[in-house]
Image (cartoon, grey):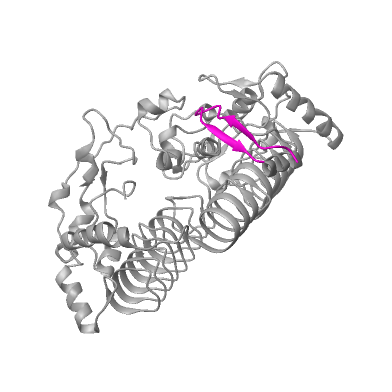
Amino acid sequence: MPAPETKTCQNCKTKFSIESEDFDFYEKIKVPPPTWCPRCRLLRKMARRNERSLYKGKCASCKKEVIFLYPENAPFTVYCNDCWWSDEWDSLEYGKKYDFNKSFFEQFYILSLKVPRLALYQKGNVNSPYTNHADHNKNCYLAFNNGFCEDSMYCKWGIRSKDLVDCYSIFNSELVYESQDSERCSRCKYVYYSHDCVDSNFLFNCKGCQNCSLCSNLRNSSYCFGNRQYSKEEYYKLLLEMEIDSYKGLQKLSQQFNGEVLPKTLRKYAIANKVVNATGDYFNECKNTKECFHVMQMEDCAFCVDDGNMKDSYDAYESAFNCERQYECHAGNRLSNSNFCTISYDSHHLEYCEMCHDSSYLFACIGLRNKQYCILNKQYTKEEYEELVPKIIQHMNDMPYTDKKGRVYRYGEFFPPELSPFCYNETIAQEYFPLTKEQAQEQGYSWKDPEPRDYQITMKTVDIPDNIKDVNDSILNEVIECAHATCLPAGRGDCNEQCTTAFRIIPQELQFYRKMNLPLPRLCPNCR
């Protein structure tokens, strides 16, 4: 068994360890050990994932105006989903013979500029044009990573739920607001890591609770406030006194919850359920996993984030559904025996591929479907493919790509961040590892300055009514100032939370606030 080693990250220059079992995994899949630390490996995959930066554009094929992931001046050819999935074009038409006089990543990037790209990653949606990385949703708006949801807005990871607003990772629930990592909840506001709760507000790690507020670690309780038992009449009197239907009252409760309840709450070492020999946080039904976060049904995996139903994989991000032997992949669903791939589904034995589906034995391909034995979108025989791939791998080591920060990319490295199709502040990396423009550029990332906005703010934050009862339908015509906009440095049109500076209330949203007796928000959806 190889001895553990301590290495210096090529990117951030910090020390990181490669353990004996890690070397065994790398040897098993025939890749060299990493030169970037786990955190930096995650960040460079995030820097290729745009979820919420959306633009209007025209499909390069049918000329229909649709919502894009790419701004109008992007150097890519972009097709709407109907055209991209049609049989009217063939991605093999863009195939190129491998050039041993150029670096591998340079050739891949040139190919990526030519092959048509999907406008958005969505499938089976109904009346949900402003959704991305989402499938089988109905009447959803600005919802991302959602699946099988209805009438939901401003959410991420809403699954099999209805009427969610401003939620993250909510499963099998209905009428839930500003909540996170909870299941089977109904008519709840601000509940976190809670299950099977009804008509409750500001809960942490509660299960089977009904009509409870400002509580933590409760089980099967009713009419509790601040973890104290009350009668039904006393409980409703307290809520009335707290003015929970007003913005001021809700803010006061929020400050009490975050300032008094949560600091005194006893917590487990991690949010974990049915785990064996596992390290990380928020994992469910996991065995033999190391440094995995927000994952479920994982076995023999390490350094994975936002994944599910995987085996024998390292460094996967946003992958799921019967995956096995993935390494350094982003959004590889039903993907096996594949390395360094992004947004590829139902395939096996892929390396350095993007947007490839129902395929196998591909190397450095983009946008292929139902194909085998292709390199740079060029078709080969099985024998030619197996002869050429080892030569390309050797060439990647002999002529590595070097980025403008001097970082070297040989075989075994994920795609260089400077060749990402997105600017840093358009990607999920900005949400988890926020940078200023100057910091991003200093670290070698590109940055997108905000586009000129042609709207005029018609309502200041301070002028928003305190109670939803005082809001009439004319609010739907207002352009409302985001509270963060007033805090932005002079001359800047952005913030580390990708502030849009203003927002509107849509009819479906107003109906939700009235149904839930909630005051209007003061922040734009991105900042929320």
Instruction: Name the residue located 26 percent from the left edge and 36 percent from the top edge.
Output: 454
Nearest to the observer: residue 324 or residue 333: 324
In what quadrant of the picture does the N terminus appear?
top right
Q: Is residue 404 above or below residue 317?
A: above
Q: Is residue 160 magenta?
A: no
Q: Quadrant of residue 247?
A: bottom left
User: x, y percentage for residue 79?
Assistant: 54, 40
Q: Is residue 420 above or below residue 299?
A: above
Visible residue check, residue 99 = no
Visible residue check, residue 440 = yes
Residue span colored magenta: 1-19
Q: Is residue 208 above or below residue 353?
A: below
Q: Is residue 13 magenta?
A: yes
Q: Residue furthest right?
A: 383
Q: How many marks?
A: 0
User: x, y percentage for residue 146?
Assistant: 48, 57
Instruction: Name the residue located 16 percent from the left edge and 66 percent from the top edge.
Output: 469
Q: Residue furthest top?
A: 101
Nearest to the observer: residue 395 or residue 10: 10
Q: Residue furthest front?
A: 3
417 sits to left or right of 381: left
163 sits to left or right of 387: left
User: x, y percentage for residue 438?
Assistant: 36, 25
Instruction: Name the residue located 22 percent from the left edge and 47 percent from the top edge.
Output: 479
User: x, y percentage for residue 426?
Assistant: 42, 37
153 sits to left or right of 274: left
Q: Is residue 404 above or below residue 184?
A: above
Nearest to the observer: residue 524 or residue 71: 524
